[in-house]
Amino acid sequence: MSGADLDELRRLRRARDQMDRDYAHPLDVPALARTALMSTAHFSRRFREAYGETPYSHLMTRRIERAQALLRRGELSITEVCFAVGCTSLGSFSSRFTEIVGCTPSAYRARDHDDSQTVPGCMAMMLGRVRRERAQPS
């Protein structure tokens, strides 16, 4: 890997780290591309090549993972959880949650989460992380 490739990967990682850290803040692909010092199209293309998913998909996965933790606690309404993780539309949040988790936020909250209380948070995050299939080059 050349020095230029490593530099680009560092800049992509900087944008990914920003998504992981600031998921609850308003973030969009053009702002993330600026963080990586790239055009929006180039950033989106290179991010997908490097991480196997689009920047938006990565951001939404982080938001849904955090929403799962908040729903397990049961202290906030689903609407409050939606806004707490940075989503601005309850309908879009519910649709994406259902797509990623496999059930609605209400159904997820209603589940028995007692078993998850004994698993350290870092392991729960790793085990609960959504795994997307990477397309194999043809």
Image (tube, grey):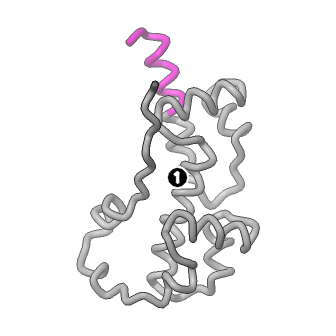
The secondary structure making up most of the magenta span is: helix
- The answer to whether 64 is drawn above or below residue 51 in the figure is below
Name the side, left or right, on which 90 lies relative to 85: right
In percent of the image, x 57 and y 79: which residue is there?
Answer: 105
Q: Is residue 95 magenta?
A: no
In percent of the image, x 63 and y 29: which residue is there?
Answer: 43
In percent of the image, x 70 and y 28: which residue is there?
Answer: 41
Q: Position of residue 20 (x, y in %)?
A: 51, 51
**Which quadrant of the figure contains the N terminus?**
top left
- The answer to whether 98 is drawn above or below residue 79 in the figure is above
Name the side, left or right, on which 95 lies relative to 101: right
* Residue for badge 1: 21
Q: Position of residue 36 (x, y in %)?
A: 61, 29
**Image quadrant in which you'd find residue 94:** bottom right
**Image quadrant in which you'd find residue 63:** bottom right
Q: How many marks?
A: 1
What's under tag 1, amino acid-wise?
Answer: Arg
Region rendered in magenta: 1-12
Secondary element type, mark 1: helix
